[in-house]
Image: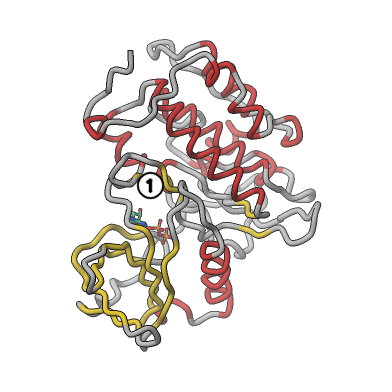
Amino acid sequence: YRKTQPESEKMPPPSSPPLPRQNAKVQPPSPPQTIVDTSRAIQFHRVGFLGEGGFARVYEVEDNRGLRYACKVVTKSSLKTKKAKTKLYAEIKIHRALEHPNIVRFGDCFEDAENVYMTLELCQSGSLMDMLRRRRRFTEPEARFFMVQLIGACQYMHDHQVIHRDLKLGNLFLDSNMNVKVGDFGLAALIENPGERKKTICGTPNYIAPEVLFDTANGHSFEVDTWSIGVILYTLVVGRPPFQTKDVKTIYKRIRDNQYEFPPEREVSVEARGLVQQILTPVPQERPSLYDIVDHEFFTRGIVPAYIPSSARESAPDFR
Ligand code: ADP
């Protein structure tokens, strides 16, 4: 699924949930082979294509010192509305202020006549979603490793008043040492006043917290990331998201009814099940804090590997 909707678009009420937007846009022209940051007199050579999302195309680039980055390219033709500009500026403002070992490092931001460019830390091992597709599911020690890094990044974001709002396997990138790097701040929100609640319905259907969909009067806050962390944990150990079905409407109904189960054919520990169940609590204030989560028996009673070997890209490592 794509993101349901951009941040500020009006949404239908939750009884008729938003459908993923069709991407009908025509392919924009490729950015130049040599991308120049004129203000800092730096050239980046485009060496490969990494992927594309709702708004941007991402290329691998190399600077004249031979250092490689990911370069996110947004065409100016897609920034004609004030809304689109505001959204991109918000992403840049939030992302560039964050510095954490498990958050994709923001390099620079510049533009030419056609595009806005953002250079980012290159994550050479793709996303956890790509890896899950190859692996089908992860072992619990691997899940603990990835979760500890994700929760550390999330704690840092929340300490800096940032809600990510789109945590999902496809936005958790991996560097060459298999460390998690949280990326894509396109839906992130900055909480500027204590107690402030966000009202915009956004996120990705499988990972979206119930209060985002069904408590639009009260709005939502940091706990939506905690919910997504619960969905991520389930997905890592089971191999697919808990509320997944063919149509988005039914996904939302399942989220509303807290309807998910652990498939009997999967051997998931009682600790993992218990932790998922605690996190996927419908009432946001009743969800455990990020501290409570890492203090749960799932983490304290099991192996947390010091690192994940690169062989894990293809097959399950043995941590015994
Ligand atoms: P959007 O905000 O448009 O959804 P994303 O930030 O999700 O764009 O990036 C789109 C794709 O580009 C990702 O799915 C991934 O394949 C690739 N990508 C993004 N950032 C990086 C990065 N830092 N390193 C490597 N690949 C990346």
Quadrant position of ligand 1: bottom left
Rendering quarter of residue 78: bottom left
Q: Position of residue 319 (x, y in %)?
A: 33, 18
Residue at point 35%, 87% (across, down) = 38
Q: What residue type is labelled 1?
A: Phe
Q: Position of residue 142 (x, y in %)?
A: 38, 26
Q: Where is residue 268 in the image (x, y as percent from the top left)?
A: 45, 14
Which residue occupies the foreground of this view, 254 or 89?
A: 89
**SS label for mark 1:** strand
Q: Given the current orientation, which residue lies at the most extreme front position?
A: 65
Residue at point 58%, 50% (across, down) = 165
Cβ of disc 1 within 8 Å of ligand 1?
yes
Residue at point 18%, 66% (across, down) = 47
Q: Is residue 61 above or below residue 103?
A: below
The crowding category of the residue bearing disc 1, from other C-alpha atoms within 10 Å (few below 14, some 14 to 19, many at least 20), is: many
Per the image, the residue denoted by label 1 is 173
Q: In which quarter of the image is the C terminus?
A: top left
Asked if residue 312 lies left or right of residue 156, the reply is: left
Asked if residue 180 lies left or right of residue 225, the reply is: left
Asked if residue 53 lies left or right of residue 273, the reply is: left
The number of numbered badges drawn on the structure is 1
Q: Position of residue 152 (x, y in %)?
A: 55, 40
